[in-house]
Image (cartoon, rainbow, N blue to C red):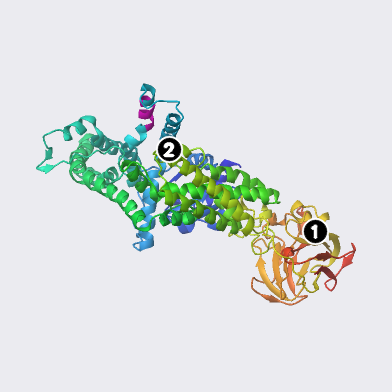
């Protein structure tokens, strides 16, 4: 992948720098806050070789890149110059509908938590490894080195309010250093000792509750949110010559007491409420909550909404010290996504799909599911159902045994020590992962998945044909075993005048190996394609080089004009019909300029493929290599 060129193209297609408020990235996707999302050319972005998908969700325009997202982000960052204090458009009307408010909330939560994830993930893995070392007897919990390492691992969680203060300030467009200072007020050791003393502490007659804000989430977010307004007020009333110290002084004098007496306690109780609410829901519905979340998690991830779980996760990690729903569901779903992609890699015959499925499967097993979700399962669709079955089965077990996660990190094979804890909890985690890994491939095998050549699935939602070279946008054929049916004899006439040749003689591996189905090919003598039977137009490819038809008796046919002609992007082709049209045998469908196509360096050999070949007993092609016309039988189907 050319990261610089990819970043440049993305920047152009989202409306340029002037359409960006700010942007960041997570493990697999660029997350961009656009001033006007309508300016983004979503279909063109989806059609890019380096892009797995694009969606506007949670107030963010999300472009799914995969594991190389950080490289594209770095190139993009060098191309644009956006200050974090840039004001949004003043006249932009806020969407007050439920959807609009929820998307704003989701975007806010994601924007605050995403930048601190690397520190939290590293700390979580550190703690998980320490748990593993103590379980294996490598370290003793009583040793000094264990205490030292535990403090190192725990520092990101203990000082979480400081990290959140900085990222919240970026999001609320306020001074991050003053925000971090207010977090320091809540965490100062002497402040903690003072509030824990025998004499109650008051500010202007208002009692200051003795609350530990270590590892807390909501208190500092609420504090920084209000601080953003106080800072604007302080900026207006502070004279220019003394603004440099008077403005921050006013902010601290106002916000520190409010944080200790009002906002901190409110945030603390809200956090406890989130944790208690989670356990209340599980208490009412029981194991079913894990099953439901595990099954539908791919759709939550698809829209990038899984980040909204962070406040709940961190609240649960503070009290009671473990989390029993979200991580259990994620473990079940992540393993299913990875195992499902590996099953596709093993079962598929298409080389391009194998190239996508193998790394996507490995990545999924280690907790990064977007490559598998976008590169494999959303394309094949049936495998997504298989993954949901596997995830639901594993979630059922995890819910019944009340699986607990003791570290806030994405569940995967490498992070399984996060489940080391009381009694048999780690064993339960291993069984949960095993169920997902075993059940999902079995479901993939029996449900099956569609070949990329199938006319109605050979293109992705952007309209791009798999042949265009994007290995992340390939769907492949492997239908579940079905009983052969003997159909009556049917004939497909030649749609093109020219010389008939065997499909195996076509200079394209996907066609010659019959990966897309059985058929024949024509070397055109005339630049016209006509209907080879009575039927309907099912698909007209956006690049006009290919058309999918369905006969009245169910034959599905793909007519692909030339080899690699998708690269012409519709030049030299004129499509006469539209999708959904009813056509008669001999009716003109497409005109194409043979000389111009050949002059551009492309082979005009045209494969004609029966894409539902598996529905028939035998596909017989024209026996002789000779010149044929529209009234000549090309393919006989039994």
Q: Is residue 303 left or right of residue 181?
A: right
Residue 529 horizontal/vertical position (percent): 76, 68
Badge 2: few (under 14), some or many (20 or more) residues near its Cα, within 10 Å? many
Helix, strand or loop for the magenta stretch, by majority: helix
Question: In which quadrant will I find the N terminus?
Answer: top right
Report the mark closest to the observer, 1 or 2.
2
Magenta residue span: 147-153
> Is residue 89 in sight in this rendering?
no
Q: Is residue 608 left or right of residue 36?
A: right
Question: In which quadrant will I find the C terminus?
Answer: bottom right
- Write down the residue under mark 1: 605
- Write down the residue under mark 2: 420
Is 151 within the magenta?
yes
- Say what secondary structure mark 1 lies in: loop
The one nearer the camera, 122 or 279, is 279
The one nearer the camera, 321 or 562, is 321
Residue at image point 47% right, 59% down: 38
């Amino acid at each position: 992948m050319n990261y610089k060129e990819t970043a440049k193209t993305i920047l152009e297609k989202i409306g340029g720098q002037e359409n960006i408020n700010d942007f960041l990235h997570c493990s697999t996707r660029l997350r961009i806050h656009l001033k006007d999302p309508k300016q983004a050319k979503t279909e063109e972005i989806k059609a890019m070789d380096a892009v797995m998908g694009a969606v506007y969700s949670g107030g963010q325009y999300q472009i799914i890149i995969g594991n190389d997202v950080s490289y594209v982000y770095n190139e993009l960052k060098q191309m644009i110059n956006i200050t974090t204090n840039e004001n949004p458009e003043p006249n932009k009307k806020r969407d007050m509908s439920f959807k609009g408010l929820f998307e704003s909330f989701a975007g806010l939560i994601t924007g605050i938590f995403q930048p601190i994830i690397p520190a939290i993930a590293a700390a979580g893995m550190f703690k998980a490894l320490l748990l593993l070392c103590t379980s294996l007897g490598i370290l003793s919990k009583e040793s000094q080195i264990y205490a030292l390492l535990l403090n190192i691992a725990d520092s990101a969680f203990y000082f979480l309010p400081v990290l959140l203060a900085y990222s919240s300030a970026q999001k609320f467009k306020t001074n991050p250093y003053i925000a971090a200072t207010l977090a320091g007020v809540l965490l100062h050791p002497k402040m903690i000792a003072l509030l824990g003393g025998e004499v109650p502490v008051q500010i202007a007659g208002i009692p200051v509750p003795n609350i530990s804000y270590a590892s807390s989430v909501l208190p500092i977010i609420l504090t920084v949110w209000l601080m953003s307004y106080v800072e604007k007020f302080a900026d207006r009333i502070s004279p220019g010559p003394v603004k440099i110290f008077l403005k921050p002084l006013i902010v601290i004098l106002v916000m520190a007491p409010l944080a200790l007496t009002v906002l901190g306690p409110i945030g603390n109780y809200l956090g406890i409420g989130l944790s208690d609410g989670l356990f209340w829901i599980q208490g009412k519905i029981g194991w079913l909550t894990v099953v439901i979340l595990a099954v539908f998690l791919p759709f939550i991830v698809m829209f990038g909404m899984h980040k909204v779980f962070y406040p709940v996760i961190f609240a649960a990690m503070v009290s009671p010290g473990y989390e029993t729903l979200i991580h259990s569901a994620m473990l079940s779903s992540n393993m299913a996504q990875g195992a499902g992609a590996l099953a596709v890699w093993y079962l598929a015959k298409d080389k391009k799909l194998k190239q996508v499925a193998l790394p996507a499967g490995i990545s999924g097993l280690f907790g990064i599911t977007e490559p598998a979700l976008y590169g494999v399962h959303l394309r094949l669709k049936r495998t997504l159902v298989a993954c949901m079955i596997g995830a639901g089965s594993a979630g059922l077990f995890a819910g019944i045994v009340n699986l607990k996660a003791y570290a806030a990190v994405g569940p995967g094979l490498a992070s399984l020590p996060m489940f080391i804890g009381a009694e048999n909890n780690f064993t339960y985690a291993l069984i949960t992962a095993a169920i997902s890994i075993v059940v999902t491939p079995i479901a993939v095998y029996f449900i099956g998945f569609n070949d990329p050549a199938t006319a109605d699935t050979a293109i992705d939602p952007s309209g791009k044909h798999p042949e265009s070279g994007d290995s992340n946008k390939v769907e492949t054929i492997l239908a579940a075993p079905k009983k052969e049916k003997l159909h009556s004899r049917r004939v497909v006439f030649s749609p093109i005048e020219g010389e008939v040749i065997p499909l195996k003689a076509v200079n394209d591996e996907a066609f010659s190996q019959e990966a897309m189905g059985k058929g024949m090919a024509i070397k055109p003598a005339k630049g016209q394609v006509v209907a080879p039977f009575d039927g309907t137009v099912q698909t007209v490819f956006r690049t006009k080089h290919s058309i999918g038809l369905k006969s009245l008796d169910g034959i599905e046919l793909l007519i692909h004009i030339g080899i690699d002609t998708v690269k012409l992007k519709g030049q030299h082709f004129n499509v006469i019909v539209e999708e959904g049209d009813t056509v008669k045998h001999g009716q003109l469908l497409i005109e194409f300029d043979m000389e111009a196509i050949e002059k551009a360096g492309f082979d005009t050999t045209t494969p004609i493929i029966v894409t539902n070949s598996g529905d028939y007993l035998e596909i017989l092609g024209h026996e002789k290599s000779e010149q044929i016309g529209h009234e000549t039988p090309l393919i006989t189907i039994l």
